[in-house]
Image (tube, helix red, strand yellow):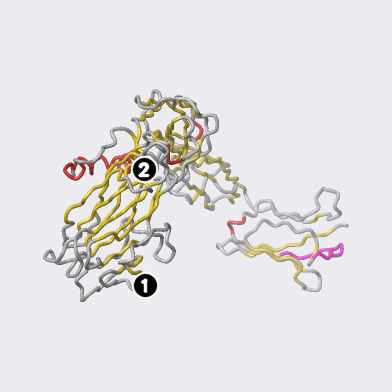
Amino acid sequence: MPGKVFARRYILLFALILTLPFFAMAQLCTGSLGDPVVNITFGNGTTPDFNFSPPSAYTYVSSSCPNDGSYTITNYSTGCFGGAWHTVANDHTGGGAYMLVNASYTPGDFFVATVTGLCPNTTYEFAAWVMNVLISPTGIQPDLTFTVETTTGIILNQFNTGSIPATASPQWGQYGFFFTTNAGNTSVVLRITNKAPGGNGNDLALDDITFRPCGPEITSAIQGSSNDVDLCIDEQTNYTFTGAVSPGYTSPVYQWQVSTDEGASWADIAGATSLTYLRQSTIAGDYWYRLSVAEAGNTGIPGCRISSNVLTINVHAKPIVDAGPDRTLITGNKTTLEGRVTGETPVYSWTPPDDLDDPTVLRPSASPPVDKVYRLFAESAFGCTNEDYMRVKVVAGIFVPTAFTPNNDGRNDTWQIPYLDPLLGATVSVFNRYGQLVYNSTGVLVNWDGTINGIPQASGTYVYLINFKNGMTDMKGTVTIIR
């Protein structure tokens, strides 16, 4: 799990290193990043997730193969212009839609959006994913300029991609830069300009436009431990989290946060507002923690918070172990234990292994000569253990009571056959003196209250028949109802 967190959080930094000329003129974030303030994904292809204004030179079309000067929002495009374009079967993340643009003949803006809810005097990272959808390398290549400006037109920063080359297969590339808002400036305009002309080429897909705040470096750690902990629920101890913030804040406000969905959403931890946090025991689950920091007065604005690396505490539940019901075994026969185990890749075994055909399976055959208690023990892949017990009672034969008194006095009110194990699958039938069937059961504990369809049967003698399906000799006799 830490590897996944590391990859998500630092992939941009690797990209910065690998594409250094691309960022050479940009203001780099030397500290930590916050969550995306804006995340324009273009929805699912039918419902846009953000309002933007395409200039008048561009026309929206529902076709997934827009002509020059047109665009569409789609999640699938194929076979465009005789196969001149790539088949783009997914957006950048594979789960939604993207904007597909066929450039106009005249270079100009094709995407303009106002971004609100920013913090003044704050540095933000802008990033977007772009694909050249033209297959031929001889066609016109997209050449984009990203500009972030104030609502009054003052440019805060801009970046030019240069020619985006054609590729043999569909390939998304990320582009971005950093900018800083002015004092009192909480809204900016994002402008994407296509500098190349349309015609033979200059066709592109756009997806996942994000703005993320950048601030001083924030780090967090688990005191006396690695930053990724796996433990069993009954072995929990209190962990102390510590945070550190590099210079840059005038009056920082701290807030520890927790996520139970692998970082998809974060919640503030009540009262956890210092550089240290004492984590208490929890129920089983995967817990991610981080320290977020904002300048005093900006804590209520998510777009102002910067976050640390992620700490993970993975609390693993014990395996669920059920040794199954007790069994009654007639001497010389066999019975089957019915164990059940669920959990995180558990291994299990029965002890003692005596008189079991295989102590490593959940349903072993047992043939002990005397009464015996068996333990089913399980251990998960994370070392969490649990156990349960069952008893095999060995008897010489089945005893069938010959009378009972169903008068609701709490004593001998039902007819039961104590050693008739349900696993024998026997069918028990009871008939009155007229041959009418008044009770019938198969493969269950016998427990007759002397009624049929809720109607009490008369005092007297009844005939029972026990039919076995495992080769045992059937049994027949009488039982008397005494009222």
| Residue closer to the observer: 355 or 31 | 31
Please give the name of the residue rendered at 40% of the width and 62% of the height, measured from the top-left corner: 44
Q: Is residue 155 left or right of residue 345?
A: left
- Vertical side of 127 occupied by 473: above or below: below
**Residue shown at 20% from the left, 73% from the top:** 83
Q: Earlier in the sequence, mark 1 or mark 2?
A: 1
Q: Nearer the viewer, residue 478 or 284?
A: 284
- What whole-number distance in Å separates the C-alpha atoms at marks 1 and 2? 31 Å
> Quick one: quadrant of the N terminus?
top left
Q: Amino acid at mark 2?
A: Arg
CB under 8 Å between discs 1 and 2 = no
Q: Is residue 457 left or right of residue 151?
A: right
Magenta stretch: dominant secondary structure: strand
The residue where tag 1 is placed is: 62
Kind of element beneath mark 2: strand
Q: Is residue 157 left or right of residue 293?
A: left
Residue 302 or 311: which is nearer the viewer? 302
Question: Which residue is at the far bottom?
Answer: 82
| Residue 39 appears in the picture as rendered | yes
Name the mark on residue 212. Answer: 2
Around disc 1, counting alpha carbons within 10 Å, would you say few (fewer than 14), some (14 to 19), or many (20 or more)?
few
Residue 346, position as x, y percentages in the image: 43, 44
Q: Is residue 469 above or below residue 324?
A: below
Residue at the extreme right of the image, as rendered: 483
Q: Amino acid at mark 1?
A: Ser
In magenta stretch: residue 42:
no
* Above-or-below relation of 202 to 345: below
Q: In the rendered structure, which segment of residues is drawn in magenta?
A: 454-464
Asked if residue 462 is among those painted magenta in the image, a careful observer would answer yes
